[in-house]
Amino acid sequence: MPRLTNLDLDLVRAFISVCECQSFTRAGARLGRTQSAMSLQIRRLESQLGQTLLSRDPRQVALTEQGEAFLPLARRLIRLNDEILAGMAADDVEGEVRLGAPEDFATTHLPAVLGSFARSHPRVALSVTCDLTLNLLEQLRDGRLDLALIKREPLGPELGVRVWREPLVWVGLGPDLLKPQTATPLVVAPSPCVYRKRAISALEAAGRPWRAAYSSPSLAGQLAALRAGLGIAVLPRDMAPGDLCILRDGMPNLADAEIALMKARSAVPPAGHRLAEFILSSLDRRSAPE
């Protein structure tokens, strides 16, 4: 029977930090360690696991296939450790946390996560704002939010930590809406919107004309327009209603979009850091990027 090895949680935290910062130097600054110390910790963790977790070159640090598989497990491990310590401590974290999120994401994926957090942290008061990503970014800059989940194009760590990847699909009442030689009617959110941008870019790349048939900042408004047959839209696959069709034949492919978690530049309260860790670990576990 092989001898079991206990993972060093300091090494696991170092790995998570490097993944989020995509830099040994920035991760070291976050944890109060030198770049060489961070590199040594990652090598020790890789030795414990017997796997190469990160590929390194002079320009960037990237996850290997094994690193991609280990990252959500690492976050779960750290979250469980922190939950145990918080539950055993007499002075559990408390205070108010102001979280912003897009309406569609907040109504589908977040309720269970936030409910679980509220039950395990009863002394934290959650305040959740649903809005467009552009408005959430403005509120974050102005100090009106502590944390925000935003929709974005795939980017580096300068615009948040990726917590969710969304496969996008074309959705509509039926294929009859797509008539040859006519502009494709789109149901969209106001610009700027990642889904709107993806729809327009895909159609233009395919040489297909389009028109904005219905524009609404509300998911409910967009779904009502789709059910009325006013056009088609780009939505995350998990959010396509059962009474509408996913349109595949003849439609251009859509690249995935991302949901990222951002923290305010100003001081985030301890409860905010706890919620951020909880969201990262929970959504990593619940999502299954392809």
Image (tube, rainbow, N blue to C red):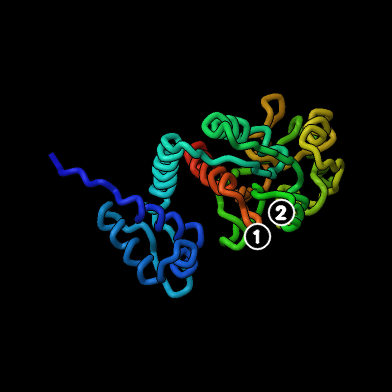
Q: Which residue is mark 1?
A: 265
Q: Please give left or right for residue 6 compared with residue 270 in the image.
A: left
Give the residue drawn at x 74%, y 50%: 144
| Mark 1 residue crowding within 10 angstroms, few (<14) / some (14–19) / many (20+) | few
In the image shown, does 59 or 267 lie closer to the viewer? 267
Secondary structure beneath disc 1? loop
In the image shown, does 167 or 109 lie closer to the viewer? 109
Which numbered disc, 2 or 1, marks the residue that appears first in the sequence? 2
On screen, residue 5 above or below 46: above
In the image shown, does 240 or 145 lie closer to the viewer? 145
Point out which mark residue 248 bears. Answer: none
Counting from the top left corner in percent of width and height, residue 131 is at 76, 43
Is residue 210 visible to the viewer in this orientation of the structure? yes
Point out which mark residue 140 bears. Answer: 2
In the image shown, does 174 or 129 lie closer to the viewer? 129
Counting from the top left corner in percent of width and height, residue 125 is at 64, 36
Give the residue drawn at x 43%, y 42%: 82
| Picture quadrant of residue 157 | bottom right
Q: Residue furthest bottom?
A: 58
Q: Residue furthest front?
A: 90
Is residue 199 visible to the viewer in this orientation of the structure? no
Give the residue drawn at x 46%, y 70%: 25
Q: Please give left or right for residue 139 compared with residue 125 in the image.
A: right
